[in-house]
Image (tube, helix red, strand yellow):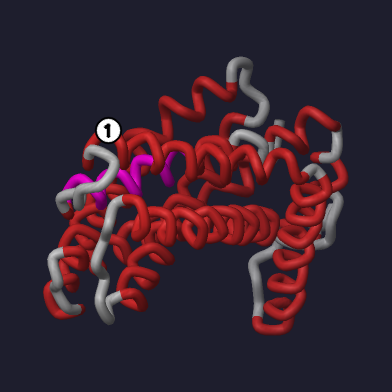
Amino acid sequence: MKEDNRQKDIGPSTIPQFWQAAFRIAEKDLRAEFRRSYEVLSILSFAVGSILICSFAWSSGGGTAEPEVAAATLWIILFFASILTFTTSFTREADRGTLGGLKTLPCSPIAILIGKIFYGIVLLFLVECVLIPFSIIFLNLDLGGRFPLLLLVCFLGVTGLSFAGSFVSGLLMFSEGKTLLLSFLLIPICMPVIIPSVLATEKILRGSGIAELIPELRLLIAFLLLIAAIMILTFKFVLEE
């Protein structure tokens, strides 16, 4: 019996179909997420409420937060927002019985995972787009002309969180207590993303340029390459119950 088409390696002729399938899966998840807008609003409300509480607790409601405090605050809030996001990434498919439909799609399992990663990147970057302006206002941050540099670090960090969160969500979608397990597993797995992201953000808030951020950017890119290799080698087995 021939192996199923979606389990085949990705060749040059299948690359457009691969990305088309990934984008369609991401679009499907985003449409479902925004139809239930209360879930997106709850994540955004958590992020804004957290930054407001931290601004009063750590800067007395009107002072300027130290760069290391502000950087850690941003990424801790984003990390917990990612937990809320990826709790429903694959588990929604398993709970609603739609996972079987994903398995029958004529595409590689990696395309399914990439679609989930795109979905996570969009939601987390949306959180960042709300979180950064509120942080600038309530933590009195002075970015000067370094805002694009901060966006670059945030994009790489969000992408790393999405890679890790989507993969762990897929691993745990058949487990009991998957919500609790997701929280515990993401903490050690995401440390290679959070630590360099915090350090890079702190340097940006202190006025450093891109040259000073090279070590942190290298760590973020190395993590992305490592976890991408792990996903390519193992994720086709994850979808098998």
- Residue 97 vertical placement versus 117 (above, below): above
Res. 215 image quadrant? bottom left
Seen at 49% across and 44% down, the residue is 48
Please give left or right for residue 46 compared with residue 202 in the image. right
Highlighted magenta segment, given as a residue range: 68-80
Residue located at (63% from left, 16% from top) = 176
Magenta span includes 78:
yes
**Going 77% across and 62% down the picture, which residue do you hit?**
27
Q: Quadrant of residue 175?
A: top right
For label 1, count other residues whose C-alpha is less than 10 Å away and answer few (under 14), some (14-19) or many (20+): few
Secondary structure character of the magenta stretch overall: helix
Residue pointed to by mark 1: 57
Rendering coords of residue 51 (x, y %):
39, 43
Disc 1 is placed on an element classified as helix
Say whether residue 54 is left or right of residue 174: left
* Quadrant in the picture for the C terminus: top right
**Vertical placement of residue 9 versus 103, above or below:** below
Give the residue type at disc 1.
Answer: Ala
Residue for point 42% across, 35% down: 186
| Quadrant of the rendered image containing residue 135 | bottom left
Q: Position of residue 205 (x, y in %)?
A: 20, 64
